[in-house]
Image (spheres, rainbow, N blue to C red):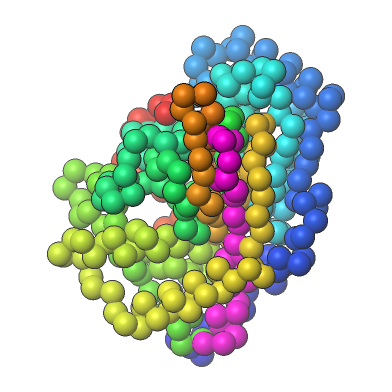
């Protein structure tokens, strides 16, 4: 890819903070009837499976809500790229049933993929005692600290709030497409630089005998679609490995220029999670992060989110670059199927 080849992409997914200033446009509040339907689906699911991971889409029937979720999935892939579903009654049904409900709702948006080498399909995002300077720590394990904007390793990522903690932890969503288009408009040479593969630290979760780093471009174009995969802290962390390619000044300049657009206040939206809120984002079109937060373990107020990585059938085998087609099914992470 050269500067002459890059061009703005996917204008339907290019929004500004002003465009999404009204939370009502990206929040779907479950009705009393829909909650009752979810609870009825849970009864069906529990009659068919003892383990939530054995529940399939047909085991969690949502005849009314299902078409709504299909529309949300289409908006995630072909539109704004993020959505919040609120009012799941976590405090009434309890964490266990809420997690089953969240899994069932997720099945109507996509197929769960493993999130780490442990094979977690329904992961925990909470303080797991890891330190930020631990070279094997991943963001979902770190407590209290803010998280930089990043993407995850699937088509969609979902987060459901069980407990928001004491304070803070606001979720941040940035428009990766809009930031890309601004970079193309202002410096196409630097934009072209990010179409080349950059090294990423595996965080110690590589397969036996595999290098502790892998390569993926920040930007990939497939037809008229843009695919963004960007986790700058992992790119920088790859440099701890002597055999990893050294980042060049131009690559760092390109990331700096992209970061400037990503972190621009006009390119992001902030939302507060309440118990029962579910956020779903398109990992290729938006980046997500969070603000720092405070827990109080003594009182039991500990921020706790459940996470799903989902592959959507809206994108068929020919609709993704090869590197994104079947990683969740063929990765060594898929050898296990476990809960967090």
Residue 315 in view of the camera: no
Picture quarter containing residue 270? Answer: bottom right
Seen from the viewer's position, the closer of residues 323 and 262 is 262
Q: Is residue 163 above or below residue 214?
A: above
Residue 9 in view of the camera: yes
Quarter of the figure that contains the C terminus: top left
Q: Which residues are magenta?
A: 164-187
Residue at (43, 74) in percent of width and height:
255
Q: Is residue 39 above or below residue 198?
A: above
| Image coords of residue 24 (percent x, y) | 81, 49
| Image coords of residue 178 (percent x, y) | 63, 71
Q: How many marks?
A: 0
Q: Is residue 32 above or below residue 203?
A: above
Residue at (29, 60) in percent of width and height:
237
| Image coords of residue 248 (percent x, y) | 29, 79
In the displayed image of the protein, which residue is found farthest to the bottom?
4
Quarter of the figure that contains the N terminus: bottom left
Residue at (66, 59) in percent of width and height:
269
């Amino acid at each position: 890819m050269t500067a002459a080849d890059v061009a703005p992409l996917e204008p339907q997914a290019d929004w500004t903070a002003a465009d999404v200033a009204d939370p009502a446009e990206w929040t779907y509040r479950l009705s009393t009837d829909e909650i009752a339907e979810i609870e009825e689906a849970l009864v069906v699911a529990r009659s068919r499976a003892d383990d939530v991971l054995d529940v399939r889409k047909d085991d969690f029937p949502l005849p009314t809500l299902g078409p709504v979720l299909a529309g949300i999935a289409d908006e995630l892939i072909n539109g704004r790229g993020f959505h919040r579903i609120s009012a799941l009654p976590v405090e009434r049904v309890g964490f266990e049933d809420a997690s089953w409900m969240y899994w069932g709702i997720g099945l109507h948006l996509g197929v769960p993929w493993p999130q780490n080498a442990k094979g977690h399909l329904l992961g925990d995002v909470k303080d797991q005692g890891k330190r930020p300077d631990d070279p094997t720590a991943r963001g979902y394990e770190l407590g209290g600290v803010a998280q930089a904007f990043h993407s995850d390793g699937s088509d969609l990522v979902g987060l459901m709030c069980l407990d928001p903690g004491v304070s803070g932890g606001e979720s941040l969503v940035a428009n990766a497409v809009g930031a890309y288009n601004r970079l193309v408009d202002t410096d196409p040479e630097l934009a072209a630089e990010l179409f080349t593969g950059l090294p990423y630290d595996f965080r110690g979760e590589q397969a036996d005998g595999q290098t502790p780093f892998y390569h993926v471009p920040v930007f990939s174009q497939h037809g008229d679609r843009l695919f963004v995969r960007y986790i700058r802290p992992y790119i920088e962390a790859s440099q701890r490995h002597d055999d990893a390619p050294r980042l060049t000044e131009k690559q760092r300049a390109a990331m700096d220029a992209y970061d400037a657009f990503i972190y621009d206040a006009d390119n992001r939206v902030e939302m507060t999670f309440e118990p029962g809120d579910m956020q779903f984002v398109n990992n290729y079109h938006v980046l997500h992060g969070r603000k720092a937060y405070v827990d109080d373990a003594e009182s039991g107020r500990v921020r706790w989110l459940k996470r799903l990585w989902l592959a959507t059938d809206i994108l068929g085998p020919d609709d993704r670059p090869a590197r994104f087609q079947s990683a969740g099914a063929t990765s060594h992470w898929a050898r296990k199927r476990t809960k967090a």
